[in-house]
Image (tube, helix red, strand yellow):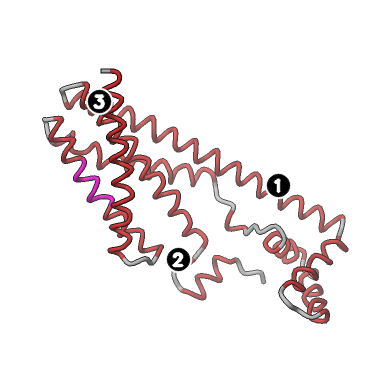
Amino acid sequence: MVVSKENRLKAWHGEDWHTPRGRIIRDIVYAIDTGLITTVAFLAGVSALVDTNESIILAGLAQIAAGSIAIFFGAYISAKAQKDFFENQVRREVEEIETMPDKETQEIRDIFDEYGFSPDEQEIAVKRITSDKDLWLKFMVQEEIGISPEQIDDPLTIGTVASGSFLIGAFPAVLPFFIFSDPGLSLLVSAMTILTFLFVLGVWKTKLTKVPKLVSGLETLAIGGLSCALGFLFGRLVHLLVG
C-alpha cells in the first residue's frame, strides 16, 4: 500500500502542522498583510479628504470588497496555473512510463546510484518499484521531477482562503470607524488596533512555525508595522498630491 507523505508525517510526528498543508500559512499571512496595508493606505487618504465617518466607512467597505474579490481571483488563477503545470508533468510521466519503460527504469537506477546504493541494491529497488504502476508513477513524479501530490492545491480553496484572510486583515483597520465619530480619533485607534493585531498574528503563527512566541510576535509586529506605516504615508502622499 502506498502511504501519502501527509499521512506519514502525521504518523511520525502526530501533529497536523508537520504536514505539507502547513505551507498554506504563507497564503494566509500574505493576504492578511495585504488587507492591512491596502486598507490603511486607503483610509489614510480618504480620512484626509472627507470629514465624516459615514463617508469613510462606505468608501472603506467598497475598497475592502474590491480588494477581497481581486485577491480571490488572483490567488485562484495562480493556484490553477500551478495545478495545470503539475498535472501536465504527471501526464508526461505517465506517457513516458508507458512508451519508454527502459528509459524510466534506468532513471530509477540513476536515482538510487546518487543515493549510494550498490548495483544489486538498485536492481532490488527497480524490481519492487516497477512491479506496481501506481508506485512507479509516484516515485518518478516525486524523485525525478520533484512534485508531491500534496503540492497540487485546489484553486478554489486557495482563492477562498486568500480572500477570507484579506477580509480578516482589513477588519481591524476599519473597525474603529464604526465605533468613534471623529475621523482623526478613529484613525489613531485603528493604528493601535492594527499593531495589537499584528503581534497576535505573530503569536498565532507559532502554532505552525514553532518559533518562540515573543520572537514571532515582535517580528511580525515590526515588519507588518513598517509596511502599514509605509502604506499610511503613501495614502497621505496621495492626498497631498491631489489635494
Counting every numbered tag in the picture gives 3
Label number found at residue 88 = 1
Q: Residue at x 33, y 43 (%)?
A: 227
Which three-letter amino acid code belongs to the residue tagged 1? Asn
x, y percent for residue 138: 70, 62
Q: Which of marks 2 and 3 is in front?
A: 3
Residue 46 image label: 3
Residue extent of the magenta highlight: 191-198
Residue 69 % position (x, y)? 42, 33
Residue at image location 21% in from the left, 25% down from the top:
48
- Residue 208 horizontal side relative to residue 230, left or right: right
- Label 2 and label 1: CA atoms lie apart by 29 Å
Residue type for callout 3: Val
Label 3 residue SS: helix
SS category of the residue bearing label 1: helix
**Label 2 neighbourhood size at 10 Å, few (<14), some (14-19), many (20+)?**
some
40, 132: nearer the viewer: 40
Q: Quadrant of residue 25?
A: bottom left
Closer to the chain start, of discs 2 and 1, is: 2
Q: Do the residues labelled 2 and 3 touch (CB within 8 Å)?
A: no
Question: Is residue 196 found inside the magenta-colored segment of the image?
Answer: yes
CA–CA distance between discs 3 and 1? Answer: 47 Å
Q: Is mark 2 on a helix, strand or loop?
A: helix
Classify residue 129 as left or right of residue 233. Answer: right
Q: As shown in the figure, which amino acid type bears the numbered disc 2?
A: Asp
Q: Residue at point 58% right, 66% down?
A: 5
